[in-house]
Every structure is written in C-alpha cells, then in structure tokens.
Image (tube, helix red, strand yellow):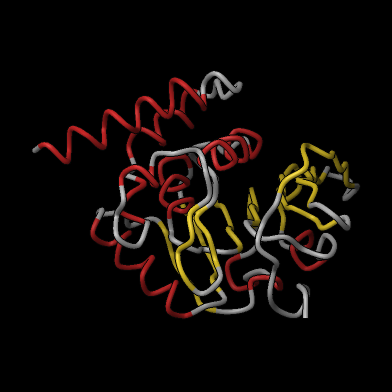
Amino acid sequence: MRKEKDYRELLEELIKETIEKRGIKDKRVLAALRSIPRHLFIPGGDLVLAYSDHPVPIGYGQTISQPYMVAYMLQELEVEPEHRVLEIGTGSGYNAALLSKLAKEVYTVEYIPELAERAKKVLKDLGIENVHVFVGDGSSGLLEYAPYDRIIVTCSAPEIPGTLVSQLKEDGILLIPVNEGYYDMLKKVVKHRDGKLEIYDLMPCAFVPMRGKHGFT
C-alpha cells in the first residue's frame, strides 16, 4: 500500500508543479497522465526517476521521454476520441499507453524487437487493448492500416518522411522532431484537404535518432 501511495503522490506533484505550471492545460491529456503509472515502463521501476521531469534510459540506447515533452506533444497532437493514431517509436510503451486514453485505436511501430515485446507485456498487464504493437521500420510508417488521423514520431528524423505524410488523412496532424544540426526541432505538420501542408516549428528538443530507410544510417 505504501508504494502505491508514494507513486500517486509523486505523479500528482509532477503534474501540478511541473507540467501544469509549464502550460499544459488540456484536460484529457492531464487525465491520461494521471491514469498511467509511469514507473511501470521504466526498468527497475524506480519511483524517483519515474516521476522526475527527465528522460530515463530504458536500454538498447533508447530513453523514455521527459514527462513535460510527452505531455506537450500530446497536447499539440490534438487527439479526439474517434481518432486512429500511428506512433513511430514505441520505446517503453508509455506514450502509447497515454494515447490509448485519448484515441480510439493506436498503432505503434518499434525498430528494436526486445523493446516491443517489453512494451506489449506492460500494456497487457495494464489491460490496455486498443494499442497494437508492431516490430519494423517505422520510418516507412505502417501502410497496412493507413490512413491515420494523427501521426506522432518519438525519434529524430533527418527530414519529414514523405511516406508518413502520404499515410496521414486530410485535416490530419503529424508531429515529428527533425534534426537541424546542433539540435532537433519539433515540427507540427498539418495536411489540408487540398493536400497542401502547413509546417510549424514548435520548439527545440533532443530525441534519439530515427532508424530505418528514412532515418539516419
């Protein structure tokens, strides 16, 4: 019982003192954050690491992203309950778990098989059934279930892959960190009904590099 209380206290403190104070106001995003125990997605389950506003290594050269960045990206993604979302870079599975509370269906692709299997297990243990985990080259998207209302990329790409844009519905949104030399820039791509794209630079950031055909060699 004590561990359960500790994690909920730490999570609430993280949300109130860091995430909300830094401008995250979306009530559905905040509710999703409160519903998912982040420490379950971190090897070893360290509570202090899990509920600090920092990325945490999860093995294989990958990390679970900083909680504020996760919340910021979900807010900017503007997910509605009827949406089908594609995530590139499952990692720990934490972001997919949050998306499961926001969208109807979530399709997530992980390059590293061991991470995909670990994520599947945690998601299953939490009773999450609307997240579908695939192993493969996420830089090419997931054509089998396209098009998607929203696409979110959790790794840094050398450019915006045309394959992902082509799998995005009209009026859809793609969020992707793109490397610009010394830093990554989080970009928001809005695809209009005439096929034209609007691209917004949201903020500098730092993500692990994308692997695969359209990633970094």
What count of labels does the image hold?
0
Q: In which quarter of the image is residue 168?
A: bottom right
Q: Position of residue 170 (x, y in %)?
A: 76, 47
Asked if residue 94 is positioned above or below residue 15 in the image, the reply reads below
In-front residue for pair 118/5: 5
In the rendered image, residue 134, in percent from the top left (x then y), is placed at: 49, 73
Which quadrant would residue 88 be assigned to in this image?
bottom right
Outermost front residue: 48
Give the residue displayed 78% in from the left and 59% down from the top. 165
Quarter of the image that includes the N terminus: top left
Name the residue located 64 percent from the left edge and 64 percent from the top edge.
146
Q: Which of 131 and 184 is in front in this view?
A: 184
Position of residue 148 in the picture relative to residue 57 (left or right): right
Q: In which quarter of the image is the C terminus?
A: bottom right
Residue at the image point whose x is 86% and y is 43% from the top = 199
Q: In this view, does 179 lie above or below 185?
A: below
Tell me what residue is drawn at x 54 percent, y 66 percent: 62
Vertical arrangement, residue 117 with respect to residue 79, above or below: below
User: Residue 46: horizontal and vertical position, in percent?
Assistant: 31, 51
Q: Residue 9: percent from the left, percent from the top?
A: 27, 28
